[in-house]
Amino acid sequence: MQTMALAMDKGGEELGSNLLSGVSLPAAVVHEGPLAHNVEWMQRFAEAHGARLAPHGKTTMTPALFHRQLQAGAWGITLATAPQCRAAFANGVTRILMANQLVGQANMAIIASLLEQGAAFYCVVDSHENARQLGRFFAERGLTLSVLIEIGVEGGRCGCRNQQQILSLAEVIASEPALSLVGLEGYEGVVHGDNPESGIRTYAKYLVDVAVELEAAGRFAEENPIVTASGSAWYDVIAEAFQGAPLQGRFTPVLRPGCYIVHDHGLYREAQSAVLGRRPDLQQGLEPALEVFAQVQSLPEPGLAIVALGKRDIGHDQLPIALRRFREAGEPSQSMSVAGWEVTKIMDQHTFVRLPEGAQDVEVGDIVAFGASHPCLTFDKWRQILLVDDQLNVKERMATYF
Amino acid sequence: MQTMALAMDKGGEELGSNLLSGVSLPAAVVHEGPLAHNVEWMQRFAEAHGARLAPHGKTTMTPALFHRQLQAGAWGITLATAPQCRAAFANGVTRILMANQLVGQANMAIIASLLEQGAAFYCVVDSHENARQLGRFFAERGLTLSVLIEIGVEGGRCGCRNQQQILSLAEVIASEPALSLVGLEGYEGVVHGDNPESGIRTYAKYLVDVAVELEAAGRFAEENPIVTASGSAWYDVIAEAFQGAPLQGRFTPVLRPGCYIVHDHGLYREAQSAVLGRRPDLQQGLEPALEVFAQVQSLPEPGLAIVALGKRDIGHDQLPIALRRFREAGEPSQSMSVAGWEVTKIMDQHTFVRLPEGAQDVEVGDIVAFGASHPCLTFDKWRQILLVDDQLNVKERMATYF
């Protein structure tokens, strides 16, 4: 049944096919070489900074990629929702950091079931109300839930806004026998302002200071409490703050970037360039690994190509970028230039590309590789992602669980 | 395996659960009453105008909904891509209008397989190149492909731009033994200008005129050639043009709106209001039927609620709209007001809601029903949609095939 279901989704292909012939396009592909590079690169980065890596799995929701991250040495997988945790655990991930509030009886029941099956699970809390709800629910089940206090910022997203709130929440957690306070969590991506780097350094130091203070007050139920933050844009700043003396040896610093695994052609390319600007010692940064291949379906006017690629196929917070072009059934090594190709609009199932003057050799059926900004919103358009080698042969069909 | 896979996706629930207790949220729901109303309403509308209805299935990609449309009398289902057609056929849809170009050998192979299995299938062409590609492919398979010429507009999307292109394409089609020209297709949604209504009336008349001209020239291979257009915003204008003497009795006029089935809380609500303005005789228009239910996860600052709902759960071309609020495990009949609640931002997994002054009774865990603009981009965020009755009991878990 599973096989049949996959065969009915878009992009379902036989292994051994080549992307340029025999694969129904559009299709989302991950390039094996850059993928392997990125997985290793970030693992080494974390280790070099004395931190554990719990890559954010919400980006890909692709267990085949989780396993590559774990095999490279990741400590666990970070996730955002109870169903995501259920999918990861069902696919063999046993240590899960849910960097989000666990809300709602049905979602609590999902997590209770994972705990009963032996999962190492942590989630975050930022309110008395949620702490009491969790305390009640897990006490009734006879289970203990490990929680981290979320540290937010004024004007940010979730998270306690000041030390008084943190201390008072720690007290509520201590009063709930079914809850165990095992650390602190933050997300620097919501820190804004004129000088984000300075703001994020201040925020990271604040996280460290609060952790030390709570530890001194005996608030943690675990010997090496977790302190965790970092997305894929400012992981270097967070790692430097966590590398200092106050945490090393006494805490478990955890970085949890997600997008790094396939990087991107927009937002994170810029962020990575800033990282390498701050840290010239980091050699050969991340490489974009995720692309969507699609075909020209119409050339209705001079200078206009309509491509069979839509909002349902690729992230579109920013317009996709044409990267390379191939002739259908052509040679993977013979890519053609797309210099001057400009995506001007994207609809549900169509992309408009303005062609440069003199682009005479474009044909209906030509295959174009597109890159996007923000990989999370490309992955979630697909039930499977094709892993390809540098000859564009399909090596693996990786199921997603959104 | 299928059951397990569903159980691992978000929103997987036991039947008989109530949305306010026992269902993991967020979840996408379709309300049974408005759904049934809309399906009947549009079917009656098409019949009253002497047209067939081939609802655009790309909106929902939910075969359980296709079957409701077919049972109400729909002539077939419209789709946009070869994998969509494959999924529909595998789920019992036998007449398929692919209102899009069929491009790429792998996609052609998918359609060839459907033809071999007995599907009644039509797709559109707008270029010599694509016609020759299709002619060659289907001739090699010993199959006949029924095609419609797509009629576009200058500055629009796909489609022939003028009559000369149309006539010359008709000749190319006639020269390909494996192709059979069975009609014309257009999409008025790409007609723009200062006065869209006037532009669309002109476009609709042009479609009719070209159809009559091609018929007079003996270009159609079928006795009652298909003439088809219409999305969910201007179907009344198209239907009126198709209702005139030139088409009735000699052609098969086909309307193919898609979004009407669940309507929406944005773009199509406005469009429908315009339809009822143009056509006061149409009683009781469409009703919004699709909502996403989600829970408040944090109340980190006065006047701010963070809801566990993200770009991966709901269409966000426009920001979602809070419609009603319930207490978790409360009574479905006791909804609370969300007057003054304003969504200010949506991230991958979080929605920011600005609360009105004095909104003191909001609790973490409160359940909020959200509406969105443009249902297509909400459906495709889900592998299953919950059909609920007016007591919010889950009646059916409808699988989607994106």
Image: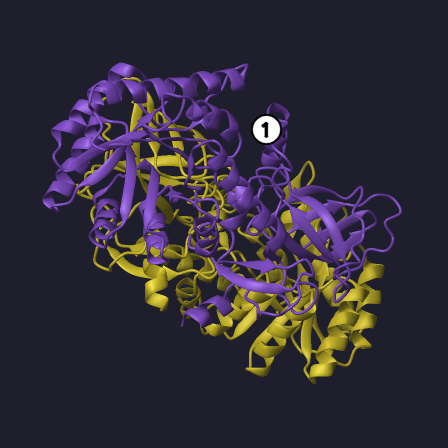
Chain colours: A yellow, B purple
Name the residue nearer the viewer: A186 or A210: A186
From this viewpoint, is residue A51 visible?
no
What's the amino acid at mark 1? Val
Q: Position of residue B279 (x, y in %)?
A: 60, 26
User: For the point 27% across and 36% down, which residue is it?
Assistant: A325
Helix, strand or loop status at disc 1? helix
Position above or below: A280 against B279 = below
Percent coordinates x, y for residue A68 in the rendering: 39, 65
Q: Does the rendering let one see residue A228?
A: yes
B349 left or right, relative to B258: right
Query: Residue, x 60% and y 23% (percent of image)?
Result: B278
Q: How many marks?
A: 1
* Residue A155 found in image quarter: top right
The residue to which callout 1 is attached is B275
> In the image, what residue occupies the spot 57% across and 77% down?
A114
Q: Quadrant of the N terminus of chain B?
A: bottom left
Q: Nearer the viewer, residue B59 or A145?
A: B59
Say whether residue B114 is left or right of residue A120: left
Left or right, residue B51 beside residue A222: left
How crowded is the residue under tag 1: few (<14 C-alpha within 10 Å), some, or many (20+)?
some
Measured along the vertical axis of the image, is residue B247 above or below residue B340? above
Depth check, front residue: A277 or A358? A358
Locate residue A400, reporting x and y percent: 43, 60
